[in-house]
Amino acid sequence: MKLILLLLFFPLVLSSQQTKDKFIGDVTVQWLNDGRSMKLKHEFSYIDPDGRLWKVPKNTVVDGESIPQAFWTIVGGPYEGKYRNASVVHDYYCDKKVERWEDVHLMFYHACLTGGTSITKAKIMYAAVYAGGPRWDTTIIKNGKEKIITTSTANTTTNEMKTITDWIESTNPSLEEINARLDAVVIETEKHQMQIAN
């Protein structure tokens, strides 16, 4: 009898461990008159696989700009697909810059998966925001206060992003491999730009 109960209970335990990450609430919005932005009518949150809460307050205005517009033809726009909820949370944290940009882009990847995006598509979306999404750093200024310094986004071209997309689809690289390849592209692009300037 104990064995039967254990066999019945084990899948429930396993299932609860696999679904730790989740969205809390629904994205309910009011479209704004600019034809692009929307304002959240209710708080919306995401809990990532490590149990970290990413909260987006009521009345937050998002516009999908955290997914680089130049890549929309390759990866899709911010309000379409199963990554839509992930883009709302990503937009908010890219705008507020209260967490490291690397953590925000990684959260976006996990939120894409939580929303039902395939692993391959989630990696492509992650590559798009890593390659062309916003980046920022903080620095300490007078009196120990922090100041946010927005750094330029990586200058990855649409052609380079298409090459990266094809590579992800054919080889299924790890996130670390994606980061390394995109970092190399950024370095090469910066070298090329310096040569043109000189």
Image (tube, rainbow, N blue to C red):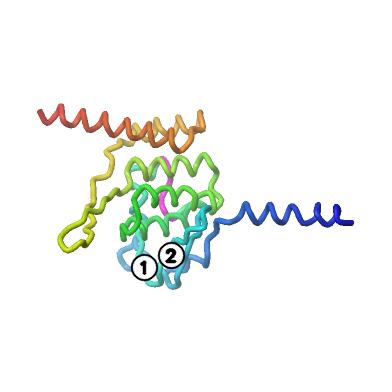
Mark 2 or mark 1: which is in front?
2
Q: Earlier in the sequence, mark 2 or mark 1?
A: 2
Residue at the image position 51 percent from the left and 33 percent from the top: 172
**Residue 198 position in % (x across, y down):** 10, 28
Amino acid type assigned to the residue bearing label 2 in the image:
Lys
Amino acid type assigned to the residue bearing label 1 in the image:
Thr
Quarter of the view holding residue 15: bottom right
Q: Give whichever of 118, 50 is nearer the camera.
A: 50
Determine whether 120 is above or below 195 in the image. below
Q: Main SS type for the magenta part?
A: loop
Quarter of the view holding residue 163: top left
**Residue 13 position in % (x across, y down):** 70, 55
Residue at the image position 16 percent from the left and 30 percent from the top: 194
Determine whether 22 is above or below 127 in the image. below
Q: Give whichever of 185, 71 is nearer the camera.
A: 185
Residue at the image position 14 percent from the left and 28 percent from the top: 196
Task: Indicate the secondary structure of the residue bearing disc 1.
Answer: loop
Residue at the image position 34 percent from the left and 40 percent from the top: 131
Q: Which residue is mark 2?
A: 55
**Residue 84 position in % (x across, y down):** 47, 55
Q: Residue furthest front?
A: 143
**Is residue 19 one of those drawn in magenta?**
no
186 on left or right of 5: left
Task: Indicate the secondary structure of the residue bearing disc 2.
Answer: strand
Q: What mark, if any, has residue 21 been given in the picture?
A: none
Q: Give whichever of 65, 176 is nearer the camera.
A: 176
Image: magenta residue range: 74-79
Q: How many angstroms separate mark 2 from mark 1 (CA)?
A: 11 Å
Q: What mark, if any, has residue 60 been given in the picture?
A: 1
